[in-house]
């Protein structure tokens, strides 16, 4: 199927501002694209650049066709594909895994320690972090810290009803 055809005629009409009418007519002469608020997926530039090289284009031509700077294209050739490590490089956690395990062991089996607010637990272990950071560290190890809800005492009237 040809990408562009001069016999294409739209079967619908759209009211466009005059400034966009010439642009829309150019788009409509080629294969029509959907008009959508979402951006359609396009092939990553690195993959397109490599495909142009395999087709026999020079590095300069392939970089121009892929719309990337020539220096970036040269880096892609020499560095190879993507990163080599399995894990993504990221910022190290504020609270180390060993410290989190120590905190969990300290709390496990002691209701009075589990009921302590997070900031007091952090102070006890010499950690300076927000509540969200401490909760995230616990979640990394599958521990869900929460203060237990206390059942209210029965009032005298409720006790008589029972």
Image (cartoon, rainbow, N blue to C red):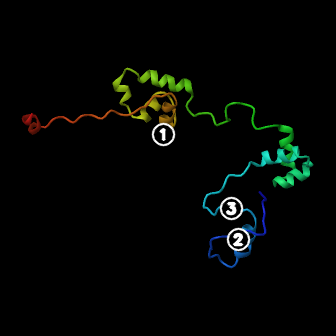
Place residue 6 in its image quadrant: bottom right
Identified at 87% across, 49% down, the residue is 71
Which numbered dot is residue 9?
A: 2
Instruction: Say which element carries label 1.
Output: helix
Identified at 77% across, 57% down, the residue is 1
Task: Nearest to the eye among marks 2 and 3: give it.
Answer: 2
Which numbered dot is residue 33?
A: 3
Place residue 86 in its image quadrant: top right
Q: Disc 1 vs disc 2: Cβ atoms closer than 8 Å?
A: no
Q: Residues within 10 Å of mark 2 (few under 14, many from 20)?
A: few
Earlier along the polypeptide chain: callout 2 or callout 3? 2
- From the top left corner, tell me how far across and down residue 29 is, in percent: 75, 68
Answer with left or right where residue 38 lies relative to residue 136: right
Q: Is residue 73 above or below residue 7?
A: above
- From the top left corner, tell me how far across and down residue 153 is, in percent: 18, 34
Answer with left or right where residue 115 lies relative to residue 122: left
Q: Which residue is mark 1?
A: 132
Q: Is residue 153 visible?
A: yes
Given residues 112 and 157, the one toward you in this image is: 157
CA gap, disc 1 and disc 2: 58 Å
CA gap, disc 2 and disc 3: 14 Å
- From the top left corner, tell me how far across and down residue 162 is, in percent: 9, 33
Instruction: Say which element carries label 3.
Output: loop
Q: Is residue 97 above or below residue 56?
A: above
Identified at 43% across, 34% down, the residue is 118
Instruction: Say which element carries label 2.
Output: loop
- From the top left corner, tell me how far across and down residue 97 is, in percent: 56, 26
Earlier along the polypeptide chain: callout 1 or callout 2? 2
């Amino acid at each position: 199927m040809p990408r562009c055809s001069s016999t294409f005629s739209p079967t619908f009409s759209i009211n466009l501002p005059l400034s966009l009418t010439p642009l829309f007519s150019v788009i409509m002469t080629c294969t029509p694209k959907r008009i959508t608020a979402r951006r359609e997926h396009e092939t990553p530039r690195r993959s397109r650049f490599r495909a142009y090289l395999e087709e026999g284009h020079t590095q300069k031509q392939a970089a121009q066709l892929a719309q990337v700077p020539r220096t970036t294209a040269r880096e892609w050739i020499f560095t190879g594909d993507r990163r080599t490590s399995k894990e993504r490089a990221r910022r190290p956690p504020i609270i180390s895994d060993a410290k989190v395990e120590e905190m969990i062991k300290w709390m496990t089996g002691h209701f009075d320690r589990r009921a302590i607010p997070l900031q007091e637990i952090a102070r006890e272990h010499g950690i300076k972090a927000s509540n969200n950071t401490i909760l995230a560290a616990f979640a990394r190890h599958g521990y869900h810290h929460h203060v237990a809800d206390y059942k209210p005492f029965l009032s005298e009237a409720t006790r008589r009803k029972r």
